[in-house]
Every structure is written in C-alpha cells, then in structure tokens.
Amino acid sequence: MNPELDTLLTTLYVLLTDRVLPDLGVSRDRRPGRKPGLSDAELLCLVVAQQLLGYSSETRWIRYARTHLTGMFPGIPQQSGYNKRVRAAGTLISATITALAKDTPSWHDVLRLVDSTPCPAANRGRLSNGPT
C-alpha cells in the first residue's frame, strides 16, 4: 500500500464527510432499501483515486482496488455495482469537484484562463457555399 495514497484518501474522506455531503443533505440512513456496503464518501474517494491513478477502464480499476485498497474500503462492489453507483452519483461528483476546486489557491483569482476549441465561424475569411 502506498502511504501517500492512504493519506490522500483519508484526507479526502474527512473532507467529504465533514463538509461536502452534509451540505448536500445526503444521508443513506433515510433512503429506503438495503444500506450499501460502500458509503457515498467511500465511493467518491474511489472515483477520485481512479482518476488520479489514471485508470480509464473500470474493470481494471476494480481489480486494482480489490487487490490494493480493501484495507481502507472493505465493501468494494463488483464492476457492475460500482458502475451503477458511479453513474447515479453525478450530483455528488459535481459537488466534490467544486469543493476541491474551492480549496485551491487560484479559486479566488480575478483572472481565469479557459481553453476551448477554435470555432470555424470565427474565421475572417470569405464565407462561400462552394467553389467560385
């Protein structure tokens, strides 16, 4: 186990349980049905770790997480269950991204640089419908 990854995931878990999830009013205790083996905060930690470690394949990520992260997350679901939970957690993921962005020093800067794809309609050349 990587001690730096452990520290990052522990810090993220505390941030999520103390600041992000209470602000959203999310609580699994009030929802109907069986309580999942993986809490929302644990799921979000796994999603962030998946992105930071560069796993684009959920199947490979679940295999890695079940091998290396079961000490911290004993209730890691199978790939299909993880996929369903991640797809349903769009609002939580958005809130997590916003909370992490607000903690960066550049959040309060006046100038923000945004990268975008150039738009072909912005060309100053002559517009035509075909060869002339």
Image (cartoon, rainbow, N blue to C red):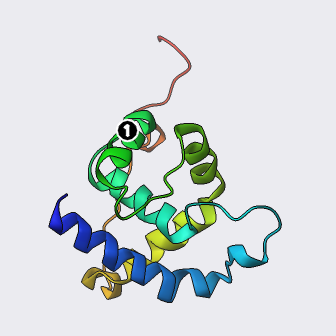
Residue 53 lies, with reference to residue 44, above or below; the image says above
Rendered residue at 26%/71% (across/down):
8
Outermost residue, left direction?
A: 3
Type of residue at label 1?
Arg
| Total residue callouts | 1
From the image, tell me which residue sits under label 1. Answer: 63
Q: Quadrant of the N terminus?
A: bottom left
Question: In the shown orientation, is residue 70 left or right of residue 31?
Answer: left
Q: Quadrant of residue 70?
A: bottom left
Rendered residue at 53%/41% (across/down):
78
Image coordinates for residue 61, horizontal then vertical, percent: 37, 42
Which one is in front, 116 or 28?
Answer: 28
Residue 89 lies, with reference to residue 81, above or below; the image says below
Disc 1 crowd, CA 10 A, few/some/many (<14, 14-19, 20+): few
Image coordinates for residue 45, horizontal then vertical, percent: 42, 65
Question: In the shown orientation, is residue 50 left or right of residue 78?
Answer: left
Image coordinates for residue 101, horizontal then vertical, percent: 38, 75
Which one is in front, 59 or 96?
Answer: 59
Question: In the shown orientation, is residue 85 left or right of residue 98?
Answer: right
Question: In the shown orientation, is residue 28 left or right of residue 12?
Answer: right
Q: Quadrant of residue 21?
A: bottom right
Rendered residue at 61%/49% (across/down):
87
Rendered residue at 36%/48% (across/down):
65
